[in-house]
Image: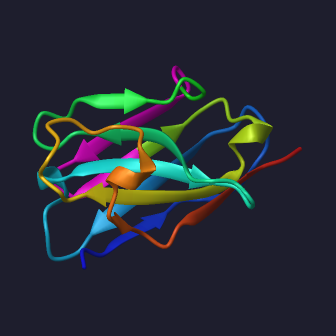
Amino acid sequence: QLQIVESGGGLVRPGGSLRLSCTAAGFTLEYYHVGWLRQVPGKEPEGVSCISSFDGITSYADSVKGRFTISRDNANNTVYLQMNSLKLEDTAVYYCALDSSRVFSQCAQVPTRYDSWGQGTQVTVSS
């Protein structure tokens, strides 16, 4: 089981910013498609953003385009999700997840593509 850990969640006012981090121990994140997904109680997980292995091509859900930025720091083996202009509806538990299947050439906003998930970090946007 590939283990990844998220951090950086918290409470922020609407319009504020947070940066989430996803780190791995014992393996290289660059070798995998990495996704950020979020879930609110009673709903299915939703793909937010992802970054493809090696070429680093990124993808975003329409709801976060222009506000969120995913990036990868290979030297620190970390994937980040910079979240700006946060809205009330961004409140959720955010998960970092890996697609280790090696089947797809690019990442996608499809939760079922991801087979290793972190424990999640809570993001609460509230006034």
Residue 118 against residue 94 in the figure, above or below: below
Q: Indicate whether residue 59 is drawn in magenta.
A: no
User: In which quadrant of the rendered view does residue 29 lie?
Assistant: bottom left
Residue plotted at (70% across, 55% down): 40
> Who's the residue at 74% across and 61% down the image?
41
- Picture residue at 69% right of the left edge, 54% below the top: 43
Q: Which residues are magenta?
A: 65-80
Queried whether the magenta region covers residue 68, the answer comes back as: yes
Q: Residue furthest right?
A: 127
Question: Residue 39, located in which quarter of the rendered image?
Answer: bottom right
> Which image quarter holds the C terminus?
top right
x, y percent for residue 38: 57, 52
In the rendered view, how is the structure colored?
A: rainbow
Residue at 79% x, 39% y: name it.
88
103 displayed left or right of 85: left
Residue 110 lies, in percent from the top left, at: 41, 43
**Image-quadrant location for residue 122:** bottom right
